[in-house]
Each structure stands twice: as C-alpha cells, then as structure tokens.
Image (cartoon, rainbow, N blue to C red):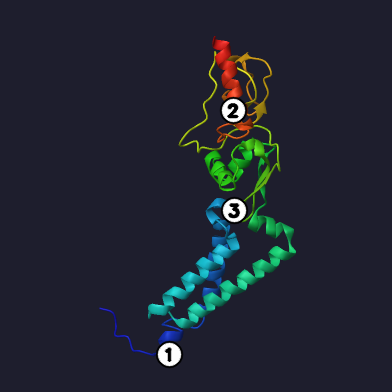
Amino acid sequence: MSAEIIPFDWGRMLLGDVPPLFLLEIVFRTTVIFGWLLLLLRFTGKRGLAQLSPLELAIVIGLGSAAGDPMFYPEVPLLHAMLVLALVVGMQSLMARLVIRSERVETFMEGVPVELVRDGVLSGDALHRANLSREDLFERLRAQGVRQLGEVQRAYFEQDGNLTVFTHDHDAPPGLPVVPPWDLEPPSPVAPGEMVTGPLACLGCGATRDNPEQQDAGALDRCACGSERFTRATTDPLAGSGDGAAARDGGGRGALAGRR
C-alpha cells in the first residue's frame, strides 16, 4: 500500500521526491520528445493531419499530456508540469518564427502543395506522394460538385490537407466520370471486339482520346500511364438527356450500329 499522502504538502506538490537538478533533465527530455514528435508528425502525411499542421498538432498533444497528469496524479509535481508547459509553448513560438523567416524550415515543417490533376488527367506519382488513393481524390472532388475529370483544370492538395480545385467556367470537355461513386457503380469499360466511337477516357489516369471513326476497342493503343482499360468519356454522367447524355451515349449508339 502506498504511503499516506499529506494534503497541501508544498514540497511534494512542487518538486516531488527528486532533487532540484532534475529540472534540467526535464528540459532535455521535453526538448527531445517534442522534436521527435514533430518529426513523426511531419511524416504521417497531410491526410493524417487533417487541417492541423504538424507544429499545431504537436503542441496540442504536448500541452494535453503535460497539463492532464498533474491535475489529478498527486505524485506528479506541479513545478515539473509547469516547466514542461512553458517549454512546449516556447518551442512552438520558436518554431513558428523559424517557419516565417526560413523557407527551408517552412517547407520541411509544412510540406508543399501537390498537383494531383492537370487538365482532367490524374498524376499517379502525385497521388502516391500525397498518400491518397484515387477513390479518396474522387470523394473530395464530388464534395466540390465535380462530376467528371474533364471539368477540372487543376487540383492541388494543399499543405493543410485541403483540396483546392479549379474548374472550367463553362463548356467543360468530356472526361472520366467520378459519379456515381465507383464503389457503387464503376464505369463500364469498353471490351475488345466492341466497336467504339467518340471520346474515351482512360480508367487509370482519366486522359481522354477522341475516336472520330468506329474502332475495335481491342485495337486501342495503351494509355501513357500504362493502362489498357478505357470507358466512354462524358460531359455529365448524371444527365438524363441533353449534351451530357449525348456525349455519354454516342459511343454506345456507335457500338450498337457496329454490331448490326
């Protein structure tokens, strides 16, 4: 059984049972752990950090851990916790100033924006660097009202984990549909032996190609991304009639005509 605790024992509350020199060890321990935490958070990726920077998340974790224990654990001295809190806030202020003054420090701490989409075409390497899957990107695009990749001029994965999208104001070219969600209804790929005409979109990167004349889908050249699978490009995959449906169904009518 632990020794009886004497309430308001100022020696225990402030210093505990350790010598005053132990405060220097706390400075060293806090500096090492805070630096290590920043490094680990930097490499978790923007997706894991949501809208907090590594520095902001590190100070939240550091302050929460340092402030919680001394509130109800009598064996944790107040002076030790107060020193840790002061060190965490001080290091946060120092790092914030370094981020403002040094572009190298800012790049290391915050990272740089990543271009995921250019002119309706996905970058597989950029998705890998951003630690995002294609479905993750499509989900974020749908949240901004994008229906097909042809609408997207540029899409940037920002330093804070948000997605910035620039779309065509009007008359967007046809592209790879991102709605409905592929988990519910994936685009129908054109199959070898099927006669196709009109715009096609690569199922790998979304790059489009135009086929003004009927062509066997099995004779299509491989996409630059390496994919051999294509689907019919569309201006609006949700349109029940009009230009979107015409763009989507034009290839289908050509295929039917080729089979007759």
The 10 Å Cα crowd at callout 3, few under 14, some 14 to 19, many 20 or more, is: some
Place of residue 35 in the rendered image (x, y in percent of width and height, measured from the top left): 58, 63
Q: Earlier in the sequence, mark 3 or mark 1?
A: 1
Local SS, label 1: helix
- Is residue 199 or residue 109 the one in the foreground? 199
| x 64%, y 71%: residue | 93
Tell me the distance, in whole angstroms, between the alpha carbons under discs 3 and 1. Answer: 46 Å
| Image-quadrant location for residue 222 | top right
Place of residue 166 in the rendered image (x, y in percent of width and height, measured from the top left): 69, 46
Q: Earlier in the sequence, mark 1 or mark 2?
A: 1
The 10 Å Cα crowd at callout 1, few under 14, some 14 to 19, many 20 or more, is: few
- Is residue 59 or residue 140 the one in the foreground? 140
Residue placed under numbered mark 1 in the picture: 10
- Is residue 71 or residue 172 the one in the foreground? 172
Q: Residue furthest left?
A: 1
Quarter occupied by the N terminus? bottom left
Numbered mark located on residue 248 in the image: 2
- Is there any visible trace of residue 102 in the rendered image? yes
Q: Earlier in the sequence, mark 2 or mark 3?
A: 3
Residue placed under numbered mark 3 in the picture: 161
| x 74%, y 65%: residue | 101
- Is residue 231 or residue 250 the one in the foreground? 250
Query: Left or right of 15: which side holds 242?
Result: right
Q: State if disc 2 and disc 1 touch (CB < 8 Å).
A: no
Q: At label 3, which amino acid type do we have?
A: Gly
